[in-house]
Image (cartoon, helix red, strand yellow):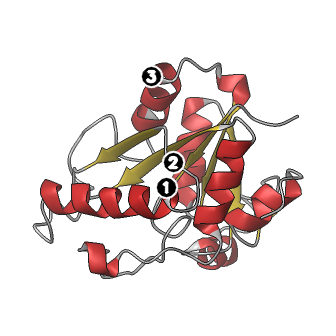
Amino acid sequence: MLPKLVILDRDGVINEDSDQYIKSPAEWIPIPASLEAIAKLNTAGILVGVATNQSGIARGYYDEQTLADMHKKMQTLLASRGGHIDSIRYCSHGPDNSCECRKPKAGMLLDIIQHLGMAKSECIFIGDTLSDSQAANNAAIDFALVKTGKGKRTLRNNPNFLQNTPVFQSLADYVEQLGLSV
């Protein structure tokens, strides 16, 4: 059964990630075939959300306008491929803030689900880190891990925790496994 809503982590799932943070639109580089995969989800009538921790704002690496510019670049590149994101939520807090939005908490996921009027049983979260998996678990929705971004490291460091988690090479691989060729 196809999900009705696919929520994606951003860095490492849609675009290349960096341990030094993605700090500008120039550094925001899509992972090969990720934008085409999102467009395929859109074409199939599946809603797409993005839930992304962006503590670089709290750390002073970039500001909210720069983040908005990165998301504008993402949407523009998606539009050129016939795709779009239906809902974007981000947490600008640092890891020591006690907010309800920062993954592994479920705040962003639940907000997207509510905003788009979905049932949890109709949703899946695709990510590349343990905190993504934990956020999905905390939101009581399905989760799949991709090996892009920090995915391979996550698998290596947490083999038992993720033993029942579906694992895909990339977002494009996930979409192809749904029967929606990229």
Q: Amino acid at mark 1?
A: Ala
Q: Picture coordinates of residue 20 (x, y %)?
A: 30, 82
Please indicate, yes or no, whether residue 143 appears anywhere in the rendered image.
no
Q: Residues within 10 Å of mark 2 (few under 14, many from 20)?
A: many
Quarter of the image with the C terminus is: bottom right
**Is the C-beta separation of discs 3 and 1 under 8 Å?**
no
Q: Amino acid at mark 2?
A: His
Residue that appears at 30% across and 63% down? 70
Name the residue tied to disc 2: 84
| CA separation in Å, label 2 and label 3 | 16 Å
Residue that appears at 56% across and 76% down? 31
Q: Picture coordinates of residue 164 (x, y %)?
A: 82, 52
Name the residue tied to disc 1: 79
76 or 29, which lies in front?
76
Q: Residues within 10 Å of mark 1 (few under 14, many from 20)?
A: some
- Horizontally, residue 80 falls left or right of residue 55, namely right
The relative height of residue 79 versus residue 56 in the rendered view (above or below) is above
Quarter of the image with the N terminus is: top right
Helix, strand or loop status at disc 2: loop
- Horizontally, residue 108 falls left or right of residue 83, namely left
**Is the C-beta separation of discs 2 and 1 under 8 Å?**
yes
- Horizontally, residue 151 falls left or right of residue 57, namely right
Helix, strand or loop status at disc 1: helix
The relative height of residue 154 versus residue 118 in the rendered view (above or below) is below
Name the residue tied to disc 3: 115
Q: Picture coordinates of residue 111 (x, y %)?
A: 42, 27
